[in-house]
Amino acid sequence: MPQSNTEPIWVNNTNAALFTDLYELTMMASYVQNELLQPATLDLFVRQLPPHRSFLLSCGLHTALDYFEHLQFDPPMIDWLRSLNIFEENFLSHLQQLRFIGDVWASPEGEIVFPNEPILWITAPLPEAQLVQTFLLNCLGYQTMVASKAARISLACGDRPFSEFGARRCHGTDAAMEAARAAYIGGASGTSNMLAARAYDIPPVGTMSHAHIMRFGDKLTAYRAFTRDFPQGSTLLFDTYDTMKGAQLATQVAKELAAQHAELKAVRLDSGDIAKLAPAVRRILDEASLHNTQIFVSGDIDEKRIASLLQSGTPIDAFGIGTQPGTSGDAPNLGVVHKLAEDITGPKSKLSPEKTTLPACKQVYRVEQEGKIIQDAIALHSEQAPAKGRSPPRVRHAQRTSKQHTKNTRNHSHPLPPGNLHPPFPSTPTLPQRPHSTTPGQALPQPQGPHRTDDTPQ
């Protein structure tokens, strides 16, 4: 096993500069040695859609801008890099002085995006633009994947809410934090992850587990204890032993709650044949005049299963989704890349088979008619938008925003309705005197409300 003299390391603002691949640093060193420090533009985009996808939902910009703002190599990092005997002292001195001074343009979080169009691009001194590649691919690729999966689940749920319950299934604790936020932007109504709820101001959601019932020995005792401790808003779990018996006992507990001027909020089904169990439970609840008590369904379900249940008329009021959002089970990776598009010598294009890239600084315009997306037009950054059915550019100057930004972006949209263009963009990107990511000012344009697409689960 690898030996370490330190405690386990969490990626944070004090060490994220080293969250990069070795070849990013060796290329940087070569650029510095050969005095290739002039600005370059690199695009981040997805080559092709995963199976059963007709769109993606952009996410991860919040994390990326925080990274840019704090990017710095501290003395212990420099000492460690020196100990590898790979890098010259002049390059290590360059790293010690490095701060991100690039220009960042990006699609707003919660925006629908498509393959081969920039989700984010940066213009920065070439060494900086190279260094940040690994982090950007990691954070935007993963979070866009999760938000896109959550959007599919949201579409399948229709007007029924779903909560993200995936912290225990995500591939790491950092991933669980990002997944909770990305799922919320993608349409989830809340999260079970309390740290994410606090950090991102997401409503916390929870029910009860089978262990609670098993410890009390029988359902009635467990139900009474739980509703006594939480008389408002309790959700009772039915299927630890016998689902129908659990439903009957829940009606008894609900009557006891009513005598205390409280109400049983919901019951939860976590296993079994939901298509048969949910109607039977609904009948028992209705016969006891518990018409307001909702049926909450969980248990390794995805958007296809949700669509099937709801299309068959199964009486379900809300869902708890664990594994699927944070792992994107049916499409667990996203082919996101970060490629050189232009430098001071002109536009650049990669010609590798099946990996060809589009050259030059770009802008993306959305063509809409009657509130529907017709197509996206990828244009040179200096070109004007299509004349008919045009909408604001998809890629906008990025700025850091407050925690409230997460709430404002959660209702994903295909963004702003057709209207006047923003003020013209410069024909060529320029480098600011300070990191644009730290510039205070107006937040990114916000989505105008939920929007349905034809991306029905397959």
Image (cartoon, rainbow, N blue to C red):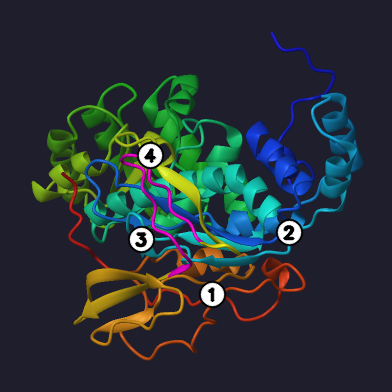
* Residue extent of the magenta highlight: 347-362
**Residue 38 percent coordinates (x, y):** 69, 61
In-image side of 355 versus 99 (left or right) = left
Q: What's the distance in space between the residues labelled 3 and 4, CA to CA?
A: 40 Å
Q: How many angstroms separate mark 1 from mark 2 (CA)?
A: 20 Å
- On screen, residue 303 versus residue 60, left or right, reads left
Position above or below: 254 against 61: above
Q: Amino acid at mark 4?
A: Leu
Task: Name the outermost residue toward the top.
Answer: 1
Give the CA separation, mark 4 to mark 1: 41 Å
Tell me the SS state at disc 3: strand
Q: Residue at x 87, y 25 (%)?
A: 83
Measured as percent of width and height from the top left, residue 352 is found at: 37, 41
Name the residue that disc number 1 marks.
444
* Mark 1 vs mark 2: in front: 2
Mark 1: amino acid: Leu
Q: Of helix, strand and loop, which one carries label 1?
A: loop
Q: Helix or strand or loop: what does disc 2 sit on?
A: loop
Badge 1: residue crowd in 10 Å (few <14, some 14–19, many ≥20): some
* First of labels 3, 4 by sequence position: 3
Q: Earlier in the sequence, mark 4 or mark 1?
A: 4
Graded by Cα atoms within 10 Å as few (under 14), some (14 to 19) or many (20 or more), the crowding at tag 3 reads many
Residue, x 26% and y 77% (percent of image)?
367
User: For the residues marked 4 and 2, what is the alpha-carbon distance in whole angstroms?
Assistant: 51 Å
Q: Quick one: 15 or 299, which is closer to the camera?
A: 15
Residue that carries the numbered disc 2 in the rendered image: 100
Q: CA distance from mark 3 to mark 2?
A: 26 Å
Can you identify the residue that label 4 sits on? Answer: 236
